[in-house]
Amino acid sequence: MDGPDGPAAPYKLRCIMERQEGAVAQVKMRAGQEVTQAILVGADRLPYFTGVVIDAPDVDRGCRTKIEVQVNGDVKRLWENWSSGLHRVTCYGDVTRDLARFCRFKEINMANEAA
């Protein structure tokens, strides 16, 4: 989570919950850490939001890696704009400037779901 030169995040290797087979990493993300979450939809849309990790619960249902995030922006707007499922890419830090540069280059519509 902190890049190749940073410390390793605590993790467990677990089976995929829905099938009880395969292997997936369950990562314990740091509370208090700023994050950016995004998902590429098709080839031309990237909804995202930023926030701070409140907790990384270890609950034995659903996705293995879970975080609770205090959203930067309007939580109601985030829920109104939410689309394309739950499986988002999460990066430590606010990486929106880098995402914007990439999206301009690839002609991808980037939209803050919490704005």
Image (cartoon, grey):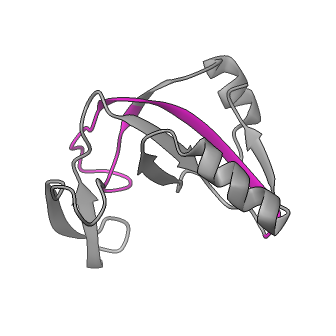
Q: Answer with the quarter of the image where residue 106 lies.
A: bottom right
- Judged left or right of residue 97, residue 81 is right
Frontmost residue, 103 versus 50: 103
Instruction: Inspect the magenta stretch and tell me whether residue 58 lies in it.
Output: yes
Say which quadrant the C terminus sits in.
top right
Q: Answer with the quarter of the image where residue 113 lies.
A: top right
Frontmost residue, 35 versus 113: 35
Q: Position of residue 65 (x, y in %)?
A: 32, 53
Label tally: 0
Q: Position of residue 75 (x, y in %)?
A: 61, 20
- Give the vertical position of 62 relative to 75 (above or below): below
- Judged left or right of residue 102, residue 21 is left
User: The magenta stretch spans which residues?
Assistant: 43-68
- Give the vertical position of 4 relative to 10 (above or below): below
Q: Position of residue 68 (x, y in %)?
A: 38, 32
Q: Position of residue 40 (x, y in %)?
A: 68, 61
- Give the vertical position of 97 relative to 112 (above or below): below
**What residue do we see at 69% from left, 39% from top?**
82
